[in-house]
Image (cartoon, grey):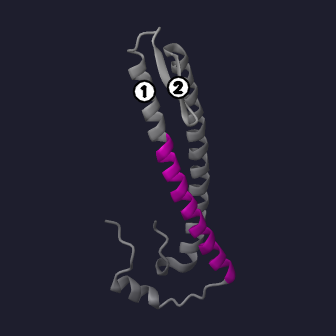
């Protein structure tokens, strides 16, 4: 389990340095908090996309066992349409590629957020030392 609070000893040692919180410090703290919330939302979205991709790949694997002349129900919006097996495989492949693009975009956004959070951590820990806890 991650420790989120300072121990009594850490609190006492940090208490000797009474650092005033300036407006720019508060803005950095607020920005860090905002980025953390975005990070959490993007990680949830990324997990959902990866699960969706995994499901599509599993379905594609199962459909490869189906006879090529057989019609397969394919969901379009709220309804199902019966399509030939090769066409459904192509549609699933296109959906998987689309999800791959979305996953890469999400990873890029997460990397950008992580970089900015690291810079803010560095600045805030440099100013406040152990008297601030930015661990998420």
In the image, farthest residue toward the left: 1
- Residues marked 1 and 2 touching at CB (< 8 Å): yes
Q: Which residues are magenta?
A: 23-49
Q: At 47% across and 75% down in the image, what residue appears? A: 133
On the rendered image, what quadrant is the N terminus found in? bottom left
Which type of secondary structure does the marked residue at label 1 adopt? helix
Q: Toward which corner of the image does residue 115 lie, by quadrant?
A: bottom right
Magenta stretch: helix, strand or loop mostly = helix
Q: Residue at x 48, y 45 (%)?
A: 48
Q: Which residue is mark 2?
A: 92
The crowding category of the residue bearing disc 1, from other C-alpha atoms within 10 Å (few below 14, some 14 to 19, many at least 20), is few
Q: Describe residue 107's horizontal placement relative to residue 66 as left or right.
A: right
Q: How many marks?
A: 2
Q: Secondary structure under badge 2?
A: helix
Q: Is residue 66 above or below residue 116?
A: above
Q: Is residue 116 visible?
A: yes
Per the image, is 82 magenta? no
Residue 129 higher or lower than 89, as above or below: below
Which disc is residue 59 wearing? 1
Q: Decide: few, some or many residues near mark 2? Use Cα within 10 Å; few <14, some 14-19, many ≥20.
A: some
| Residue 117 screen position, x and y as percent | 57, 62
Distance (Cα) linking label 1 and label 2 = 8 Å
Residue at position x 51%, y 58% in the image: 40
Q: Is residue 72 above or below residue 49?
A: above
């Amino acid at each position: 389990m991650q420790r989120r609070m300072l121990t009594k000893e850490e609190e006492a040692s940090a208490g000797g340095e009474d650092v005033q919180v300036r407006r720019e410090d508060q803005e950095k703290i607020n920005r860090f908090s905002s980025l953390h919330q975005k990070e959490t939302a993007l990680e949830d979205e990324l997990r959902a996309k990866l699960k969706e991709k995994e499901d599509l790949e599993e379905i594609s694997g199962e459909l490869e066992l189906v006879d090529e002349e057989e019609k397969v129900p394919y969901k379009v919006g709220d309804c199902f349409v019966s399509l030939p097996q090769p066409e459904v495989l192509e549609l699933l492949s296109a959906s998987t590629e689309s999800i791959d693009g979305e996953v890469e975009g999400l990873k890029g956004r997460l990397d950008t957020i992580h970089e900015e959070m690291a810079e803010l951590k560095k600045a805030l820990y440099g100013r406040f030392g152990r008297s601030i806890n930015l661990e998420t």
